[in-house]
Image (cartoon, helix red, strand yellow):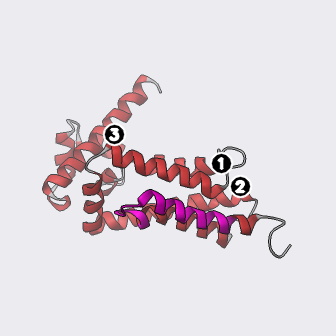
Amino acid sequence: MGRRERKKAATRQALADAALELFLERGYDAVGVRDVAEAADVSVTTLFKHFPDGKEALVFDEDTDREAALVAAVRERPAGTTVPQALRGLLREERSRRVRADPRFGDFLRLIDTTPPLREYGRRMALRHETSLAAAIAAEAGLSADDVGCQALAHFALDAVSLVHGRQDAEAALDRIFALLDGGWSAMTDPVGPGH
């Protein structure tokens, strides 16, 4: 990454950090984009250059990176690794990193849960991720883009993280969900499996 890209990434991160801090401190509705821009020491124009989708996008600053990581987990998985195994590895690492790296992660999730515009934005973002992930899974499996098995795997893989959130046994629960998904996926894609 060159100097210019590093500077853009740093500005984007500063905006996202300032927004989250202000939203958690004052509440989402009480904070405007001007407040966020001032807290990050940039202009409102600069804020919209980095977040053209507006205020909600400030909370979901990893949207594009996460979508790319999901697709890469499928396409670039090691030989002998099934699609569900690759997704489990990515999602476990992602969850662990967030929980370890940010003590405010629980507050972040509560903010989304209690703020209707953020919940709706998150739902639309998850649908985009699910669609991209299903397409990548179908391409890797040599199946049609609208294959319901690929769509189901993408849907349930992404829902797994919310299913285990707040559980004492979150890691074990995630493993159990993905063991189920892996078994079903292997049965569906195994050319010498049942019915052959």
**Mark 3: which amino acid?**
Arg
Taking depth in this image into account, of 5 and 183 the one nearest to the observer is 183
Element at badge 1? helix
Specify whether 51 is left or right of 172. Answer: left
The residue positioned farthest toward the top in the image shown:
3
Span highlighted in magenta in the image: 163-185
Q: Earlier in the sequence, mark 3 or mark 2?
A: 3
Residue at horizontal 59%, vertical 63%?
Answer: 179
Distance between mark 3 and mark 2 Cα atoms = 33 Å
Q: Which residue is mark 2?
A: 140
Marking on residue 42: none
Element at badge 2? helix
Is the residue under label 2 in contact with that under label 3 (CB below 8 Å)?
no
The residue positioned farthest toward the bottom in the image shown:
195
Is the residue under label 2 in contact with that under label 1 (CB below 8 Å)?
yes
Distance between mark 1 and mark 2 Cα atoms = 7 Å
Residue at horizontal 22%, vertical 44%?
Answer: 18
Where is residue 60? Give x, y as percent.
36, 53
Where is residue 72? Give x, y as percent.
59, 47
Q: Earlier in the sequence, mark 3 or mark 1?
A: 3
Q: Which residue is mark 3?
A: 12
Asked whether residue 172 is drawn in magenta, I would say: yes
Total of numbered circles in the picture?
3
Q: Quadrant of residue 157?
A: bottom right
Q: Nearer the viewer, mark 3 or mark 1?
A: 1
In this picture, is 189 found above or below 59? below
Quadrant where the image shows the C terminus: bottom right
Marking on residue 75: 1
Q: Earlier in the sequence, mark 1 or mark 2?
A: 1
Specify whether 189 is left or right of 164. Answer: right
